[in-house]
């Protein structure tokens, strides 16, 4: 590297290092000043609380002496307890300040006398001598002590405020000095940067052509990636649509073919059962065959419903979702709640099957991974479109292990939702469950 480049950099580094050392020293001074100011502010706050506790105790005493109500007397020891805690806290805060500590020591002596006077009046009232207690109160000893305590607290507050102001002024001066130094360093560095920039300008011009070539190549790569992404998304949507069509065709074929086989077979078995009523062995075999055929019919129905739910084609998305989730949760011993809006009517077939599969995948993930006891499903029509919400009270998808186990299912749900122009949001809180929101825009607004 030529000297014309590194020499200004060395000067800039030297100047910056010197300024860094000065700034570090200033920062330490700032930190000490800030700590002292913070202690002063806390001390003032505690002194205000201390005075408030005195007032609370005095109010409780006077309220009890005047009214004789026990609820005033109950607040008196609480106020004294708070007062003792504040005394201990203030002693800790004043540990490094001898002058303030000595003044507060005098205040503690006055407080002890003041508490003694109040206890004496309360003792008279507690024994039934309220007149004597009022007379003692009217003697003015407690009021005199309180005035002296307040005057002493004001003196300490004034001393602390004066010190805070002094520290703040010192802090401001240090800040001004640091700002001046930083301004000088910035000016020097800017000058050095300008010199270096002028030297680098010619080299930069030579690199412009290379940069332009790289930018052109990068833009072409980005266009290729976007094109491949669109192709893959389109292919994914096509494959999902084709899969659903194939499932529907297979379901119809199974229904027609197996129905045409199993139904006549069962009718023939019923005919045989009537003819073999006198033969115990034959009747038992017929019953066994009837049971097997019934199981085959149930299996056919389950397979067809898994391939293409008939409720979805005949009654729509609401009925199909409610039936599927209820049956699935019942088999897994899960409680399920529904909130299905009456505004949701029949939807386009591709939209219904996509939302049905998303809900099916969500419930399957809950059963496999969430360790939940409750599933809540919401389907409603909103201004943005159709909203599908599936929530559970399980471990939450925030668990990394659970997220990895369910990642393929989640990616599949995202592709399916995006293929119908919708959005999906997954929020999980460890230990509190997972909420999946699916929103699909609809052409027409909801009718009231």
Image (tube, helix red, strand yellow):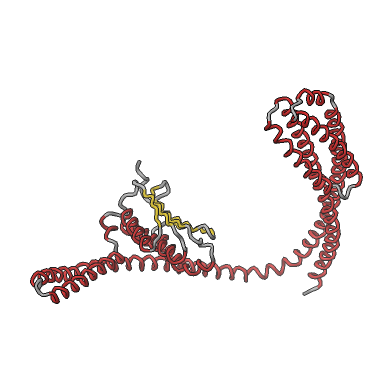
Residue at image location 10% in from the left, 71% down from the top = 277
Horizontal side, residue 132 vs residue 241: left or right:
right
From the viewer's perspective, tell me whether residue 34 is left or right of residue 358: right
- The residue sitting at the front extreme is 127
Q: How many marks?
A: 0
Between 370 and 78, which is closer to the camera in this rendering? Answer: 78
Judge whether 412 appears above or below 336 on screen.
Answer: below
Which residue is found at the position 36% from the left and 60% from the top?
330
Q: Quadrant of residue 409?
A: bottom left
Front residue of 52/422: it is 52
Is residue 183 at all visible to an observer of this figure? Answer: yes
The N terminus sits in image quarter: bottom right
The one nearer the camera, 75 or 302, is 75
Residue 377 locus on image (x, y percent): 40, 54
Name the quadrant of the C terminus: top left
Across and down, in percent, residue 290 comes to 18, 71
């Amino acid at each position: 590297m030529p000297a014309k480049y590194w020499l200004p950099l060395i000067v800039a580094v030297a100047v910056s290092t010197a300024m860094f050392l000065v700034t570090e020293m200033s920062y330490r001074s700032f930190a000490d000043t800030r700590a002292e100011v913070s202690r002063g502010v806390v001390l003032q706050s505690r002194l205000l609380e201390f005075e408030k506790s005195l007032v609370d105790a005095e109010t409780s005493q006077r309220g009890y002496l005047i009214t004789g109500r026990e609820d005033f007397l109950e607040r008196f020891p609480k106020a004294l307890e708070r007062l003792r805690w504040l005394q201990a806290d203030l002693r800790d805060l004043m540990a490094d300040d001898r002058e303030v500590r000595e003044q507060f020591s005098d205040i503690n002596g006055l407080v002890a006398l003041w508490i003694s006077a109040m206890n004496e009046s309360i003792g008279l009232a507690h024994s039934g001598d309220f007149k004597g207690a009022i007379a003692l109160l009217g003697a003015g000893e407690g009021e005199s002590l309180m005035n002296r305590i307040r005057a002493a607290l004001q003196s300490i507050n004034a001393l602390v405020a004066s010190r805070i102001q002094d520290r703040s002024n010192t802090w401001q001066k240090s800040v001004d000095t640091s700002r001046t130094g930083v301004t000088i360093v910035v000016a020097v560095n800017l000058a050095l940067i300008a010199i270096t920039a002028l030297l680098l300008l010619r080299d930069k011009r030579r690199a412009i052509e290379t940069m332009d070539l790289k930018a052109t190549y990068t833009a072409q790569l980005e266009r290729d990636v976007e094109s491949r992404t669109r192709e893959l998304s389109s292919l994914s949507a096509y494959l999902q649509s084709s899969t659903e069509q194939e499932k529907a065709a297979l379901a119809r074929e199974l229904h027609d073919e197996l129905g045409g086989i199993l139904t006549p077979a069962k009718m023939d078995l019923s005919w045989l059962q009537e003819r073999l009523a006198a033969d115990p062995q034959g009747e038992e075999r017929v019953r066994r065959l009837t049971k097997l055929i019934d199981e085959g019919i149930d299996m056919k129905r389950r397979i067809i419903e898994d391939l293409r739910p008939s409720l979805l084609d005949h009654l729509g998305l609401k009925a199909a979702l409610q039936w599927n989730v209820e049956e699935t949760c019942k088999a897994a011993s899960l409680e399920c709640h529904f909130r299905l809006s009456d505004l949701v009517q029949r939807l386009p077939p591709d939209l219904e099957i996509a939302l049905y599969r998303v809900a099916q995948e969500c419930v399957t993930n809950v059963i496999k991974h969430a360790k939940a006891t409750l599933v809540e499903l919401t389907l409603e029509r909103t201004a943005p479109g159709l909203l599908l919400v599936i929530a559970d009270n399980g471990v939450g998808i925030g668990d990394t292990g659970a997220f990895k186990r369910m990642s393929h299912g989640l990616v599949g749900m995202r592709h399916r939702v995006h293929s119908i122009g919708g959005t999906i949001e997954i929020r999980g809180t460890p230990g509190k469950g997972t909420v999946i929101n699916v929103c699909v825009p609809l052409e027409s607004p909801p009718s009231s």
